[in-house]
Amino acid sequence: MNFSYTERNTIAVGDKFGNDVRPMLSACPLFSVYDQDGNYTYEVPEVEFTNPIGLLDYTKSGNKNKNTRLNGNIFLTLQPIRNLIYRSSFGINYQSSSGRSYVPVYDLGETKFNPLDIVRQNMSSGYNWVFENTVSYKFDIKDKHNFDVLLGMSAEKSGIGEKLNVSNKNSIFDDFEHAYIDNANFIDKANTTISGSPFTPQRLLSYFGRINYDYKNTYMATLVLRADGSSNFAPDKRWGYFPSVSAGWVVTNEKFMEKTSKWLEFLKIRASWGQNGNQSIDPFQYLSVISFDKYYSFGANDTPYSQGAYPSILPNKDVTWETSEQLDLGVDARFFRGRLGVVFDWYNKTTKDWLVQAPVAAIQGTGAPFINGGKIQNKGWEFGISWNDTHNEFSYGVSVNISRNKNKVLEIVNSEGIIRGPLSILSHNTDWFYAAAEGLPIGYFYGYKTAGVFQNQEQIDNYVNSKGEKIMPNAVPGDLIFVNMNDDNVINEDDKTVLGDPNPDLNFNFGFNCQYKGLDFSLTANGVTGNQIARSYRSFSQKPFENYTSEILGRWHGEGTSNDIPRVTAANHINDKYISDRYIEDGDYLRISNITLGYDFKKLIENIPLQKARIYVSVQNLYTFTGYKGLDPEVGYGGDSKNGEVNWAGGIDVGFYPTPRTYMFGISLTY
C-alpha cells in the first residue's frame, strides 16, 4: 500500500493564453515593477505595458491545491498441485483533491483590472480498480524442453467519482486565508458559477494467454495473444486482438563457442514481432453527446436565461482500436568477464488506425470526434555500451546510449492527405504552421523560407523571376526576402514549404560513476540533436510594441547592418506575420542532468550500529550546452490542446518555464 499527500500552488504555461511566463518576457523593461508609493506600476497603453509581476501576484499568488493518493493491492496465491499456480489480485487507486484561490480587487490598467474580489473552491474524489486472475503451469520434457503456460483475465473500471467547482465574488474577507465559499455566499447569477458532475466511467475487459519455451536455456520463444474490450468504442467496435511472438538464441551456450569464452562471456540474438492496442480517447465518441452548459436569454433584457442543450461532438460510430505493430531485432553481449556490455536493437514500428481528433469546419457548430485518422511509422535503432571495472578499492563504470528514430506519416485518412494544426499559435491572427501529412514527419513545421534581408532598393528591383517580373515590388530596404518557390511574381500560400522537424534525429544518454573506499561520485547527462524548435515570445501581430528579446539589437537599421533580422515595424507587417524560418531554431542540446557526491561514514567508523550512513550532495540540471536562444530547449508543447484536438505536435516555445536547477543535501541510513 502506498500513500501520498502533496500541496502546491502553480503558475500556468502552455499556449499563449493564460501563460504566466510569456507576459514577463514581453513586458517593457524600462518600467519599474513598483511606483514611488510602493504600488504596482500602472499600465502604459502606448507601449502595451502591463505589469506582469503585479498581474501574477494578484491572480496566482493566492491559490493552493491539495492532492491525496492511496494505492493498495491484495492478492491470493494457491498451488493445488506442483507447478500449477492460481493467482488472484485486486488493486485500487483512490485519489481526492481540493483547491481554492483568491483574487483581490486590483487595477493595473485599462485592460487588466478586477472590480470585485473572486473566491474559487473545487473538490473532487474518485477511484479506479483492477481485478486480475491468472493460472500458470510449468513443466518440462526430459529436462531439456521447458514450458511455462499462463492463462488469465483482467477487468478494470475507472472514472468512479465526482467533482464540484464553485466561484463567487464579494467575499466578506479580503485575504486568501479566508478564501472559502461560505465567506462569499451571496448568490448572483452575474457573479456566481456552480458546476458539479460525475466522472465519466470507462471499463476495460481483457483475456490473455502466454506460452514460454526454452531448450537448455539456449533456444527460447514466447507466444502471446490478448483480447481487449473497451467501453470507449461502440458495441460492435469494442474488441481488439493483439498477438505477439519472440525468439532468442544464446549463442555462447553452443559448443562451437567454447574457444571464445575467455573474451566473450555472453552473446544472445533475439527477434520479436507483436501488436499493442491503444484506446485512450474520451468515451462515447460514437454517440452525439448532449451538453447542457449554455444559457440564452430570449426576448427583452429582463427575460430570465433559459438553459440550452446541444450536441457537443459529431458522432463517429466507426472509431475503434489503434494498433501499433513492431518488429524488433536485437543483440546482447558481454565481454571480458562482464566488464564490457553491448546492446543493440533495430526496430520498425507502424501505428495503424491512428486515434486523432481531426479538426472540423466551424460551420459544423460543434466539436470534432476522434477518428482512426491514419498510419504512422517509427523506424530506428538503439545502441548501448557500458564498461565496469574494479582496481583494488577503486571501482568505476561508464555507459553511453544512443538512439535514432525516423518518423514518417504513411497515410492520412482524408481527401487531402493532411491534418493541419490550429491557427494563431505563435501569435494572434497567424496561419497554421505545423501539420501531419503523408510522407513527412509528424508535426513538421511549414511556412516561408527566407534568403536574408533586402539591403537597398536596387536589390529589391533585381529580385525577379525567370520572366523578369519583380517578385516583391512593395518591399523596402530592411524587409525579409521571402523565397519564391514556384517562380511566379507573388509571395503567397504557394510558396510555403517544410521548415523543420521537431523530432530529434538522435537521442543520447551518458553516465559515469566511481567509488573509492567510502567516497562515491556519479554524473548523468542527456541530449538530442537534429530537431528544430519554433519560438516566439511576442504577440507581434496584435501588440507590435511588446518587448523584444536582446536579439533585436542585431536588427537591420541601415545597409549592411543585418542580413538575418529585419527592420522593426509598428504595423502588422509580413516580416512578422508570415511564419517563416525566422522563427525556427535548432534544438540541439547536452544537459548535465545530475551530479552527486557522497560519503559512507560506515567505512570510516566501522563500529556504528548501521549498515550504511551515507551523506550526499546533489545538483540536478547543472548546466545545458545549447545554441538555442530560448529559455529551455527541452520543450514539448504542441499548440492549443483544448479538448484534446492536438496531442501529436511538439517543439513549440511560446513561453515555457525552464527546468530549474536543484541543489539537494541528504542523509541515507540503512539499519
Image (cartoon, helix red, strand yellow):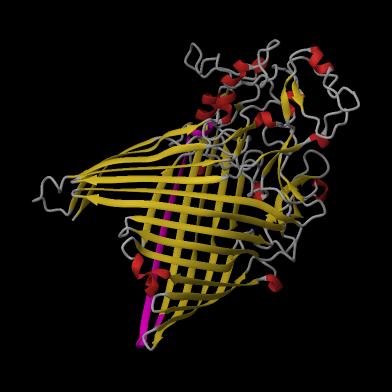
**Residue, x 44% and y 82% (percent of image)?**
135
Chief secondary structure of the magenta span?
A: strand
> Looking at the picture, does residue 427 appear above or below residue 560?
below
Give 562 or 615, whichever is nearer the viewer. 562
Q: Residue 315 location in percent, x, y? A: 75, 61
Residue visible at 77% across and 40% down in the picture: 302
The answer to whether 491 is drawn above or below residue 386 in the figure is: above
* Residues shaded magenta: 59-86
Horizontal side, residue 111 vs residue 178: left or right: right
Q: Is residue 421 above or below residue 146?
A: above
Q: How many marks?
A: 0
Where is residue 77 drawn, in percent x and y? Answer: 37, 79
Residue placed farthest to the left in the image?
A: 607
Q: Which quarter of the picture shows residue 285?
A: bottom right
Figure check: 522 above or below 624:
below
The image quadrant of residue 637 is top right
Is 597 colored magenta in this rendering?
Answer: no
- Please say whether residue 63 is one of the residues in the magenta stretch: yes
Which quadrant of the rendered structure holds the C terminus? bottom left
Residue depicted at 39% across the width and 72% down the height: 256
Identified at 70% across, 19% down, the residue is 566
Residue 239 occupies which quadrant of the picture? Answer: bottom right
Do we see residue 288 in this rendering?
Answer: yes
* Relative image position of residue 261 (x, y in whole percent): 33, 65
The quadrant of the image that shows the N terminus is bottom left
Front in this rendered view, residue 529 or 76 = 529
Can see residue 278? no
Compare residues 317 and 66 and report the one nearer the observer. Answer: 317
Q: Position of residue 307 (x, y in %)?
A: 73, 51
